[in-house]
Image: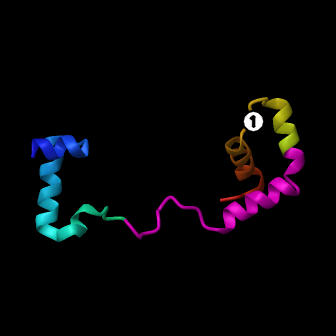
Amino acid sequence: MAEAALVLGLSERHTYRIKAWIRKEGIKGVIHGNRGRRSDRKLPREIPRRIVELARGEGKAHIRTLRVCQPNFSPLAFIQYLIPRFMVY
């Protein structure tokens, strides 16, 4: 097991865990349990679309204001600015 751990770049203990998973569930034991599921953190599709609309349209003036006030303005800062003003959430 020590040699397998070295080849895989894992700890010896973790290689034992992998071996146990494979014995219990077959090759599927190695695949992450959340594979194929939608993330709980993923935003609904409408929100990114609305943010882009605001950035291109009525939010443009706000972007200019932010850039003057914050030279290191970032897209995250814009989103944080949009949420309370345009109720984007």
**Left or right of 23 on screen, residue 55:** right
Residue at coordinates 74% horizontally, 57% vertically from top-left? Answer: 51
Front in this rendered view, residue 6 or 55: 6
Q: Is residue 16 above or below residue 65?
A: below
Residue at coordinates 24% horizontally, 69% vertically from top-left? Answer: 28
**Left or right of 62 on screen, residue 36:** left
- Is residue 8 a member of the stretch shown in magenta? no
Q: Is residue 71 above or below residue 12?
A: above
Coordinates of residue 45 in the picture (x, y in percent) = 64, 68
Coordinates of residue 36 in the picture (x, y in percent) = 41, 70
Residue at coordinates 12% horizontally, 51% vertically from top-left? Answer: 16
Coordinates of residue 82 in the picture (x, y in percent) = 74, 50
The quarter in which the C terminus is drawn is bottom right
Q: Type of residue at label 1?
A: Phe
Q: Is residue 13 above or below residue 35?
A: above
Visual colour scheme:
rainbow
User: Which quarter of the picture shows residue 68?
Assistant: top right
- Is residue 39 a member of the stretch shown in magenta? yes
Front in this rendered view, residue 85 or 48: 48
Front in this rendered view, residue 19 or 6: 6
Residue at coordinates 47% horizontally, 62% vertically from top-left? Answer: 40
> So how many labels did they put on this image?
1
Q: Which span is picked out in magenta?
A: 35-62
Residue annotated with mark 1? 73
User: Which quarter of the picture shows residue 35?
Assistant: bottom left
Q: Mark 1 packing: few (<14 Cα in 10 Å), some, or many (20+)?
A: some
Badge 1 marks a residue whose secondary structure is loop
